Amino acid sequence: MLEAGELLARLVRGPEPELINHLKARASDADLGGRLHTVIADRLHITPAESSRRIHDAAELGPRWALTGEPLPPVLAATAAARRTGGIGEEHIKVIRTFFKTLPAGVAADVRKEAEKQLATLATQLRPDELREDARTLYDMIDQNGPAPHDDDQDSARARKRGITLGPQQGDLMSAISGWVDPELRAVLEAIEAKLGAPGQCHRDQENPAVDDEPSQQAARTDVRCKAQRFHDALLAGGRALLASGKLGQHNGLPASIVVTTTLKDLEAAAGRGLTGGGTLLPMSDVIRLARHAHHYLAVFDNGKPLALYHAKRLASPAQRLVLYANARGCSFPGCSVKGYYCEVHHVLPYAGSRDTDINQLTFACGAHHPLAEQGWTTRTTATGDVEWIPPAHLDHGQRRTNRYHHPEKT
């Protein structure tokens, strides 16, 4: 029964790559009401990451079309065929796609085709973990000598592989960091660590930590931080110095800086947390430490609405943007998780009609959703101060109108 159910589930998903590729090729963001991966995520109630994975799978497993309109077979034709018959699952596909993603670009097309046939056949007979081992063996057989010392393909391979991911905050407000750095960034990090990560340097627990000057022998001798902790504090000190230098210019109308919002009550009690424009929760001790060297703004709200902050210019003022960090926090489009740092200011009521830039009629909208306001979508502010996004009739399927993602306290 379980085996039959698994086969049925795979068969039901069979047409998915073709449908996704059809949407990708023939429907614009305006037609869909947003970017493809977010629309699929919202309609299927899956995560954006899962939606993106399915789109990437479809690009290699679904039908394609030439510029002339001629149909083309899937990139991974044998794998696509095995998927359509229910012989393999998503984990098998992940193994096969990873194999070809890491295979050197110089491998001949006929070798690639034969390797894909072998892996697709093995996938119908093995578990994904077993397939991974066989794929590793096949990889070593194809690339017996490894990359050439001066292989130009390695530069592009490193460029594709590079990336750093900052994980979500955990219950203790800590975040895991992962990824791959290229040789140049590694060299930069080594130089920063050598200077700012030396024993006694940039010690965050010291009242006057050494940053520019060399630390005293006593400070170095009594430094109990491990190497990883010193490296962490070195990056923190380097980042602070860069932000304080003013050399980063402006970002969305404000000097590149850390924007933190909190309540006067929490600040006076030295308790609670602050919220940054990027969505990071800061313990009050960190907020107070940052505030020692910051410019402070007081925003006064009446029943959740900011008081008397408007002007006649179309562009939002720096003060209005600061209030939006406290009020809107992020993109107001339903379900969007983009934080305020990465958003544009949107006029809830079109500026052409009101000729006014009133803070109570401003909100945040990200680069993907802001253009929808010119493509049939309308926005309005409710009596509770929330912003509703109303879709055109052909896209209205009863979806949510407001976004509570940035306001969990309202849920």
Image (cartoon, grey):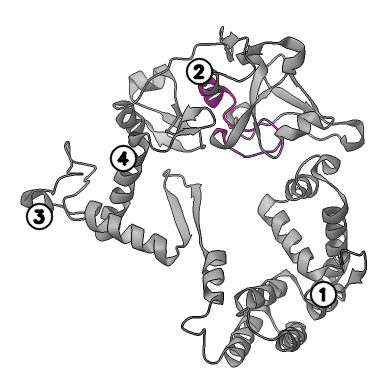
Q: Is mark 1 on a helix, strand or loop?
A: helix
Q: Tag 2 or tag 3, which sits nearer the N-term?
A: 3
- The residue pinned by badge 2 equals 319
Q: In this view, does 213 lie above or below 293?
A: below
Which mark is first along the chain, 2 or 4?
Answer: 4
Image disc number at residue 285: none
Q: Which residue is drawn at 72% across and 29% down?
A: 402
In primary-sequence order, the first of circles 2 and 1 is 1
Real-space CA distance between mark 3 and mark 1, rounded to the nearest whole angstrom: 62 Å
- Mark 4 burial class by Cα count in 10 Å: few <14, some 14-19, many 20+: few
Q: Which of marks 4 and 1 is in front?
A: 4
Task: Report the span colored magenta.
Answer: 322-340
Q: Mark 4 — residue? A: 241
Task: Check disc 4 and give the amino acid type.
Answer: Ala
Residue located beneath label 3 in the image: 221
Q: What residue type is labelled 1?
A: Ala
* Amino acid type at mark 2: Ala
| Residue 332 highlighted magenta (yes or no) | yes
Residue 331 image point, x, y percent: 64, 33
| Relative vertical location of residue 142 with respect to residue 350 in this rendering, above or below | below
Residue at screen point 70% across, 40% down: 368
Q: Is residue 315 magenta?
A: no
**Real-space Cα separation, disc 3 to disc 4, in angstroms:** 25 Å
Q: Report the residue at 50% width, 18% height from top.
A: 319
- Residue sitting at x 60%, y 76%: 102
Where does label 1 land, which residue? 80
> Disc 2 on helix, strand or loop?
helix
